[in-house]
Image: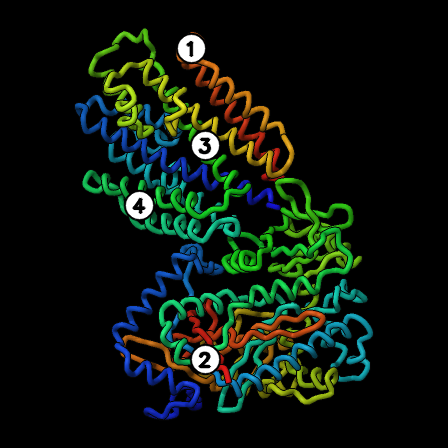
Amino acid sequence: MSSPPPSFDEMLQGPDQVRDPYSVYYDWFSHDDLRRLQRKSREAEAFFRRIGITFNVYGQQEADERLIPFDIVPRIISAREWSRLERGIEQRVRAINAFLHDIYHRQEILRAGRIPQHVIAGNEAFTPQMIGVTPPGRVYTHISGVDLVRTGEDDFFVLEDNVRTPSGVSYMLENRETMLQMFPELFTRLKVRPVSAYPQLLRRSLSDCAPEESPNRKPVVAVLTPGIHNSAYFEHAFLADQMGAELVESHDLRIVDGHVAMRTTQGYQPIDVIYRRVDDAYLDPLTFNPESLLGVPGIMDVYRAGRITIANAPGTGIADDKALYSYMPDIIEFYTGERAILQNVPTWRCSEEESLAYVLAHLNELVVKEVHGSGGYGMLVGPAASKKELARFEAKLRAKPANYIAQPTLALSTVPILTKSGLAPRHVDLRPYVLVSPNRIEITPGGLTRVALKKGSLVVNSSQGGGTKDTWVLGD
Amino acid sequence: MMLGKTAGGLFWMCRYLERAESVARLVEAGWHMALTQSASADSNEWESILITAGILDAYKQKYDTFATANVVNFMLRDRDNVSSVMSNIELARQNARMVRTALSSEVWEATNEAWMTLREILARPVTDRNLHDTLATIRLNSSVVRGALHGTMLRNDIFAFARLGTFIERADNTARILDVKYYVLLPSAAFVGTSMDNAQWEVILRSVSAERSYRWVTAGDSSAKGIAEFLILDARMPRSVAFCISKVRQYLGHLAEEYGTRLPSHDLADQLDARIRNTDIEAVFQTGLHEFLGEFISDNIRLANHIERDFRFYG
């Protein structure tokens, strides 16, 4: 088995060799009392429990509501680093929206041969119901959460674009709130760019995407949740609350006089924008999934008539499908005429015979992902896998090669967490949140840093034992 | 503008909170009786307390006798008992989660903390040694939620639906407590003035936390009629039927004003309130205490159903 390559630590380049963005923090940390910090860390947990920032774990009935562990050491990004990320993200999101419009209209990119037909035609994420439909304001991905990883001083990669219903933004906001309460002195020493405006920006961004004609004087916005048993329910309630929007379930909605309307104590009230946190399949049983008891029958007719905004638009999943991921550099070039600022991780498409042969020969070095999987499920991390797991995956790959892609195991950067014995490096990723409206693209400085709490682990997903950190983007 | 579902969630959140308190109070009254009576006399008392809480059948499916430890644990913490304090707190919190956007963060956090605290202390069997502390914790936690509700919520339709839930539930609880015991309150009861009687009166008053206020109002002069009058008709007593129904009418009035429409539930509440206000205890006994209470309980249920329909709780 190959040993993992050495990782880039974002705080320490060697003993007491502190990278610039961390110098003020490290100085403060070194002069503080470790026991006090550990106590603070426990306080943070009690705080999270009290306000109820919990999530439900799929397939674990016993552990009804769990807390995502929070680490009190911030992840710090310099102004220079951030401005480059920002440009890269903006470019990517612009390209994705252009791609989505194209793929559901003229399909120029297929005609130009930049993406093979079969990648789209045979793809479940491609949504024929969206062909010829233009969403209000021509925005497809109102909210996205781009997953980034870092491997070196200047090496950032996009791992996933997350343009369906990315979650986690409530943790970004609550993590900052917690840090402000626990360590106010740090915020006087360092200029950290605020994130707290996110809910207001989201509200404005969604309102700007509302249909032009509406029975309401001001756009009425509602957050559509599957309900209190959903793993991200806390976040749905939190965002509705912070935006001053209604939190609805599909049975609160019906079509009245050609509009989507919600049942209020005084009758049905039309709404203009639905920020849905349900999958496409649960939007409209008439259009997508006749078996579904969830959803609002007829909502897609209203959508096609341009009388409701659905954020994100149905069918965006084609853009972050893993089978399409490897074409992203082409997509960016095709629609923006520029080279991609952020790198893509080299990817082997197992549907291609040569690639499959390579992947099978190097399974213990690679990360293999299911094309339609998410949340770290159905994934193989070669260097960390047992012989049995490798054998199991080899069988899976041979049976259905088109279901998988493979990537090199990236040496994800580390940021220290606070442990019983002090600081210890752990692997991280970063999910910045991006808002798109017809007139602007808004990227909240920072985002959610997820951290693999187990030593050496590369899996940062909260469903698999990952935690989070506050993310600081420094001002100029 | 408020979702019908949200109105329903607020209404039920407060009903469950009130019910949790009421069940805890019944346990307290029964426990006090069990402590002050001989061992053989107390079993009867627990039976009537289980009837009052509406859970006698459920209890009997699990236990053959009315041993204090079994009843107490069944009423406080048994998850098979949908009316146990823990089940009610669980349901209250579930509704609070559902309507979280309508609650101040103080109310949500108080409710969530009550749930966390009680889940922890009610995870283990309640014994003689810790029953007192357990009941005190339940009382304290529900007081904190109530305090947050009063201190931090805007007085709009949100508050009105929450309060409607509280008072519909409380009116029901008080009426049921009296109805299960109506025979000890009849002026003709044979054992008037016996110590058995006094103990029974004590249980009733304790079940609604009124033992002190009643003594204060009557200057220590207890009588069956006096207790019935106090708990049904005295509008100063915050758990009396008269007080609760006047509050229901008041908050429905707020809604009529805020929404600019009167609905069937308004008329029903007005009628019910007028009936209680325009009667006296002599007339109640003439109708028959049991009949009077039975009629009130079903009218109160009818009113709750109308509120649910009028404000589109469920569709």
Between A459 and A339, the residue placed more toward the observer is A339
CB of mark 4 within 8 Å of CB of mark 1?
Answer: no
Front residue of A330 and A292: A330
> Where does the image place residue B151, in percent across and percent down from the top left?
41, 46
Marks 2 and 3: in contact by CB < 8 Å?
no
Residue at image point 39% right, 57% down:
A50
The residue that label 3 is drawn on is B167
Q: Pointer 2: what residue?
A: A191
* Mark 4 vs 1, N-terminal side: 4
Q: Of the residues tagged 2 and 1, which is closer to the observer?
A: 2
Q: Secondary structure at mark 3?
A: helix
> Chain for mark 3?
B
Pointers 4 and 1 within a single chain: yes
The reply to whether residue A396 is in sight is no
Describe the element under mark 4 as helix, strand or loop.
Answer: loop
Between disc 3 and disc 4, whose residue precedes?
4
Are the numbered discs 1 and 3 placed on the same chain, yes or no?
yes
Q: Which residue is mark 4?
A: B122
State the mark number for residue A249: none
2 and 1 marks in contact (CB < 8 Å)? no
Of marks 2 and 4, the one in the foreground: 2
Front disc: 1 or 3? 3
Q: Is residue B227 left or right of residue A149?
A: left
Disc 1: which residue: B288
Classify mark 1: helix, strand or loop: loop
* Amino acid type shown at disc 3: Phe
What distance separates the C-alpha of mark 3 from that of mark 4?
27 Å
Residue located at (41% from left, 52% from top): B109
